[in-house]
C-alpha cells in the first residue's frame, strides 16, 4: 500500500539514497538520482487530486480553466472530462458550477472538432 502513495514512495526513495550516501563514507563518490515522475497521470492530475481531497471543488474547476492555454484542446478537454467524472461522484459538489463547467468544456470540444 505504501508504494501506491506518491509521498511515501518519495520518502522511501530519499531514505534509501541517503542511506547509500552515508554507508559509503570514504569510498568513491556516489551520485543518487531520484525519479521525478510524480505519477502516471502527470502534475495536473496530481494537483487536481489534491484539491479534490480537500473538497476544493471550485478551485479544481478554476485550475482546469487555467490550463486552457497550457494544453492542447484535446488534452484540455480530456482533463476537464476527467474532473467532471470525479466531481459527479461527490454529493457536495455545486450542481450549478458543475453544469456551467460542462457547458464551457463542450464549447471547447465543439470548436476543436470544427477545425
Image (spheres, rainbow, N blue to C red):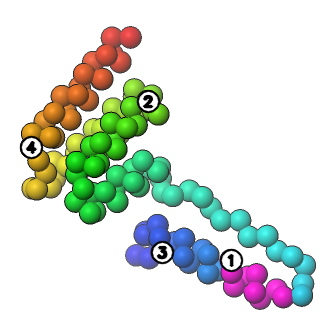
Q: Earlier in the sequence, mark 3 or mark 4?
A: 3
Q: Dots 1 and 3: beta carbons under 8 Å?
A: no
Q: Residue at x 22, y 48 (%)?
A: 58
- Residue 1 vertical placement versus 64 (above, below): below
The residue stretch that appears in magenta: 17-25
Location of residue 28 in the rendering, given as x and y in whole percent from the top left corner? 90, 79
Q: Are marks 4 and 1 in contact (CB under 8 Å)?
A: no
Determine which residue is flagged by label 3: 8
Residue 17's mark?
Answer: 1
- Relative vertical location of residue 93 with respect to residue 1 in this rendering, above or below: above
For marks 2 and 4, the one nearer the N-term is: 2
Task: Name the secondary structure under disc 3.
Answer: helix
Q: CA distance from mark 4 to mark 1?
A: 47 Å
The answer to whether any part of residue 45 appears in the image is: yes
Q: CA distance from mark 3 to mark 2?
A: 32 Å
Q: Residue at x 47, y 70 (%)?
A: 7
Quarter that holds the N terminus: bottom left
- Check disc 2 and report the residue beneath it: 69
Which image quarter is the C terminus in? top left
> Is residue 52 shown above or below 14?
above
Nearer the observer, disc 4 or disc 1? 4
Given the current orientation, which residue lies at the most extreme top position?
A: 115
Left or right of 2? Residue 60 is left
First-in-chain label (2 vs 1):
1
Q: Quadrant of residue 18?
A: bottom right
Amino acid at each position: 500500500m505504501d508504494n501506491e502513495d506518491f509521498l511515501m514512495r518519495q520518502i522511501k526513495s530519499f531514505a534509501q539514497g541517503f542511506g547509500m550516501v552515508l554507508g559509503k563514507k570514504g569510498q568513491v563518490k556516489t551520485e543518487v538520482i531520484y525519479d521525478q515522475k510524480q505519477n502516471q497521470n502527470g502534475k495536473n492530475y496530481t494537483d487536481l487530486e489534491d484539491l479534490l481531497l480537500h473538497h476544493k471543488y471550485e478551485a479544481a474547476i478554476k485550475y482546469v480553466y487555467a490550463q486552457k492555454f497550457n494544453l492542447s484542446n484535446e488534452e484540455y478537454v480530456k482533463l476537464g472530462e476527467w474532473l467532471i467524472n470525479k466531481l459527479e461522484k461527490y454529493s457536495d459538489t455545486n450542481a450549478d458550477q458543475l453544469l456551467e463547467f460542462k457547458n464551457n468544456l463542450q464549447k471547447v470540444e465543439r470548436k476543436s472538432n470544427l477545425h
